[in-house]
Image: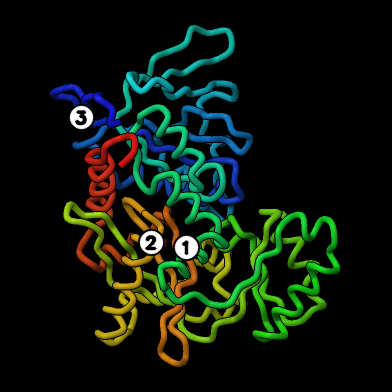
Amino acid sequence: MSSEITPQSPGRKPRVAVVFGGRSSEHAISVVTAGAVLRAIDRTKYDVLPIGITTDGRWALTADDPERMAIADRTLPSVEQLAQSPDGTVVLPVDPSDREVVYTEPGAVPKALGEVDVVFPVLHGPYGEDGTLQGMLELSGMPYVGAGVLASAVGQDKEYMKRVFISFGLPVGPYEVIRPREWDTDPAAARKKIVDFAGEHGWPVFIKPARAGSSMGITKVDDASGLDDAVAEARRHDPKILVESLLRGREIECGVLEFEDGPRASVPAEIPPVTAHDFYDFEAKYIDSAAGLVPAPLTPEETARVQELAIRAFDAASCEGLVRADFFLTEDGEFVINEINTLPGFTPISMYPRMWQESGVGYTELIDRLIQAALRRPTGLR
């Protein structure tokens, strides 16, 4: 059943709570993304309430100060640096008939911060992008930007993402999964499972956390001697790990955005080989700012094909709002989908806003379209 709440009172601008930070290893990138969103959102059209989640899970009232949310001198920002108080807590409503946000501090009378009409979550990784926050917002009847509970969970867990894609006939590369119990109870058998996979598909392989993003915890492994260190690094981020074969080809990305008449695909981008890094890892993306090519130098037929596959992936996972779909264009000319990102980065160098900029949708309009799509969407089952 849909909520009966009026989105906002007459004459009042919609109030957007930008929620960022979080408990995942992508905390800092979420802060950078939030800074970019706060800088670009149309303040003549929306009121904004920035809410940061600290690394230990406290919801904090933060400064509305995008300049302090950027990477400076290779130093990553945090919510703790932005919080207005070391103890204050923001509480979102849990009653679907209420939209009032409250701020509390120890020993002080709770303070009403006013109503919120829509939440714009820019959390990356577990405890935010994976359906957990979305489930909380569904319970409270609060509209929010982006994918729902199921799509968020599927988009976060690379194993089940691939299973969904395969069931919908999308092309997926070879992979293997090592579950926590396998490595904990019989690491020799789990190690053999990886070696056998490499024997079938060839070295090198990539060892990665099953439920992380921003290229966190990924290691390219050239032979069996590097497996233990690579698994340990991946398991720092997630006890479940994914093993993928090397797909030789070009890295192509494509954005999907929800318009009034349905999802549309952006012009694609290409991530060129990064000579200073073994692959497009976290440092290449965010610290050294490896540049992508927008638009990608593809033929019209290749462009149409990857756009079609991106929208099919969006629909297969039941996504809403936005998605960045990542592909390999293999040496035999076939596109293979690697993964989707239901809350892709919005940093100034991120590929998703750059692709839409090149497609004729500027940053401020992009944010506006995402908020308006969330406000149009009914709460509850849909």
Q: How many marks?
A: 3
- In the image, 296: left or right of 376? right
Q: Is residue 76 visible?
A: yes
Q: Is residue 277 visible?
A: no
User: Which residue type does callout 3 highlight?
Assistant: Lys
Write the residue at 82% across / 56% down: 184
Q: Quadrant of residue 168?
A: bottom left
CA gap, disc 1 and disc 2: 7 Å
Q: Which of 33/197 is in front?
A: 197
Which mark is drawn over residue 316? 2
Quadrant in which the N terminus appears: top left
Q: Work out whether 107 lies above or below 36.
A: above
Residue to which mark 3 is pinned: 13
Q: Earlier in the sequence, mark 1 or mark 2?
A: 1
Q: Work out whether 202 lies above or below 64.
A: below
Q: Earlier in the sequence, mark 3 or mark 1?
A: 3
The colour mode here is rainbow
Which mark is drawn over residue 164? 1
Q: Quadrant of residue 119?
A: top left
- Secondary structure under badge 1? helix
The single residue placed furthest to the left in the displayed view is 11
The answer to whether marks 1 and 2 mark residues whose Cβ atoms lie closer than 8 Å is yes
Query: Disc 3 vs disc 2: which is toward the camera?
Result: 2
- Secondary structure under badge 2? helix
Give neighbour class at mark 2: few <14, some 14-19, many 20+ (Cα, 10 Å).
Answer: some
Q: Work out whether 145 lies above or below 194.
A: above
Give neighbour class at mark 1: few <14, some 14-19, many 20+ (Cα, 10 Å).
Answer: some
CA gap, disc 3 and disc 1: 39 Å
